[in-house]
Amino acid sequence: MEVIETGIKDLIVLRPKVFKDERGYFFESFNQKAFEAVGITEQFTQDNQSLSSKGIVRGLHFQSPPHAQGKLVRVIKGAVQDVAVDIRKNSPTYGKHYSVELTEDNFLMMFIPAGFAHGFATLQDNTIFSYKCTDTYHPESEGGLLWNDRELNIQWLVNEPILSDKDKKFQPFSLFISPF
């Protein structure tokens, strides 16, 4: 497995070894020992999957301690622009984000540790997005940042995105007080 550095401490993109032949392909989407070998020692407790049409933006979400979540994200079908924002107040990259395209063809995965807000935009219809979490969902711990906040300056790859009412109402970064 290849580790691709993002320039933000602890946030990494992974390129698994994919074996392809005339029948299709095979790869290990998760192997605890292989992940530990690249520094991901967190235990995953919940798997989630979503299906979205093209042009959907989900995020930017996080869960506050003590229910903070790390995530291992990937695309099963379709494509997304995946975005992680460092919200660890003592981090030298606080408020910085990293964006990567995850597709069914490139097999890339991103590990997003606790202390990041996360979101994605779907770039194709019928995109299936999968993520492993290091803690179970806890509604009272949920928080978010405004997806199109000018201070964050995320260059989303969708025009006229479709958002949930909840995601439209998150606070701008300038009013955010980090729980991390």
Image (cartoon, grey):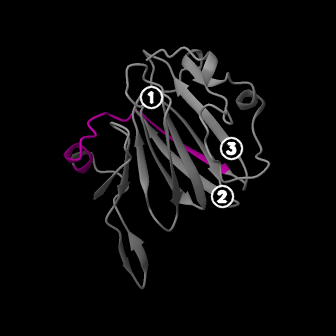
| Residue under the point 66% across and 24% down | 172
Residue found at the far bottom of this picture: 22
User: What's the distance in space between the residues labelled 3 and 2, CA to CA?
Assistant: 10 Å
Where residue 146 sits: x, y (%)? 67, 29
| Residue under the point 35% across and 69% down | 18
Q: Is residue 25 left or right of residue 173?
A: left
Where residue 75 sits: x, y (%)? 52, 55
For the N terminus, the quadrant is bottom left
Tag 3 secondary structure: strand
Q: Quadrant of residue 133?
A: top left
Q: Which of the two discs, 3 and 2, labels the residue nearer the N terminus? A: 3
Q: Give yes or no for residue 44 being in the magenta stretch.
A: yes
| Residue under the point 58% across and 30% down | 61
Q: Is residue 162 left or right of residue 170?
A: right
The magenta stretch is 34-51
Q: Is residue 5 left or right of residue 81?
A: left
Q: Classify mark 2: residues with Cα within 10 Å, few (<14), some (14-19) or many (20+).
A: many
Q: Which residue is mark 1?
A: 69
User: What's the distance in space between the residues labelled 3 and 1, CA to CA?
Assistant: 20 Å
Q: Which of the two discs, 3 and 1, labels the residue nearer the N terminus? A: 3
Where residue 29 sits: x, y (%)? 38, 55
Q: Classify mark 1: residues with Cα within 10 Å, few (<14), some (14-19) or many (20+).
A: many
Q: Which residue is mark 3?
A: 57
Q: Which residue is mark 2?
A: 123
Mark 3 and 1 residues: CB-CB less than 8 Å, in contact? no
